[in-house]
Amino acid sequence: MNDALIFLNHSQLTRHPRNMRRAYPVGDVRRMAVSQMERAKRGEPACVQPLIVTVGPGVIYDPAEHCEFVIVAGHMRHAGNASLKGSAPPLNCIVRYYASKAEMLADMGTENGPRTDPGLIAWAEYLRDQIAAGVKLHQVMQRTGLTIGRVRLLEALLELTPPARQLVNDGALPLGAVEHLKRVTDTSAQSELARELAGRRATLAQTDLAVKAWLARSSGAPGRAARSSNCTDSSAPETPALAGAPKALPARLRHVRAAAREACHECGSDARLDEPAWEIAVAAVKQTCGTCDLKGFEVVCKSCPLAQAMREVVALVKSTPTPTPTTSAAEVIA
């Protein structure tokens, strides 16, 4: 059916609730308002590009009847016009017929996606609406230019808790982290883990490691003692360090290593390191690069009471005289 060009006041238009962009920068809205006023003074239509509006999917526009118009494309232009209130010039609009909701949503995506970046959550909600409206997956990919992998990640994004979802949307966590975080079904734990990983700017590898460790711990997996030989160092404390951090650092640093070994053997997390607590301490002394996967494991071991002892080890070693060239930092704390 043919489009109709008409002029409408901003109060006659309703914003579509599923528009990909929900908010606009104040500066952009002001510039849009100024542009419309200047064009109106020159006797030109308020907008260079008319707004696309509709009276609803499957509904034919009849000029003789009172209609309620919904914006399909042009929400920013409408926002700028509405900011002018009573002095706003009428908006030039094209009334378009859509046979289905899917066709209307397709136009909304074409308008918003390529011109601006509405955000990952907005894209995910748009894809969900498209599929719910009956659009086939291959059609969604053709219209948006998205790969199947990205579509699946965006779909999974909406399965995360609101805090975790927002961290991914804001770029604090990579989109690929969604695959790992969604495996944490405890909502509180998922949100907390996402915040900790975002604070550390964790990589995908670090995120994977942290999630695996959490899953192993939450499932009550047997500790390392069942898979490793018990600590036999007679100088080790009689009780594991997990019973509480020592009030004072042991006289000999090798006592701390024994405590670290015992603590890690008792821990239920399925980490890839044999003695993660000790490895973390050694890595800190060696000033290991921040991209090392140890960072991801530190997120999980954060609550271990042995962590404070490890920090004391690092502080003590750094305060000792510089070792001879033939002695490594690891050997000093061993």
Image: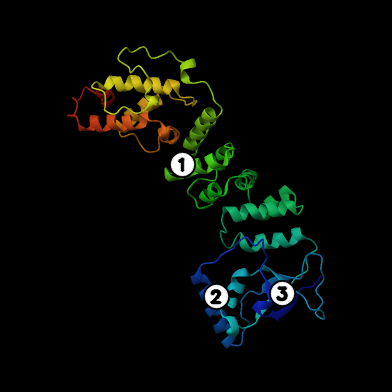
Tag 1's secondary structure? helix
Tag 3's secondary structure? strand
**Whole-percent x and y of residue 263?**
40, 23
Query: Gap in Å between the C-alphas at discs 3 and 1?
Result: 47 Å
Position of residue 121 relative to residue 300, above or below, is below
Mark 3: amino acid: Ile
The total number of labels drawn is: 3
- Going from N to C along the chain, the mark reached first, 1 or 2, is 2
Q: What's the residue at 53%, 28% (across, down)? A: 216
**Whole-percent x and y of residue 315?**
25, 33
Query: Gap in Å between the C-alphas at discs 2 and 3?
Result: 19 Å
The residue where tag 1 is placed is 197
Q: Which mark is residue 32?
A: 2
Mark 2: amino acid: Met
**Whole-percent x and y of residue 112?**
62, 62
Callout in the foreground (1, 2):
1
For label 3, the crowd category at 10 Å Cα-Cα, with few meaning under 14, some 14 to 19 and many 20 or more, is some
**Whole-percent x and y of residue 97?**
78, 68
Q: Please indicate whether residue 295 sits to the left or right of residue 176 in the image.
A: left
The residue where tag 3 is placed is 94
Callout in the foreground (3, 1):
1
Mark 1: amino acid: Leu
Residue 9 in view in this figure: yes
Residue 286 in view in this figure: no
Q: What's the residue at 21%, 22% (across, down)? A: 326
Q: Are marks 3 and 1 in contact (CB under 8 Å)?
A: no
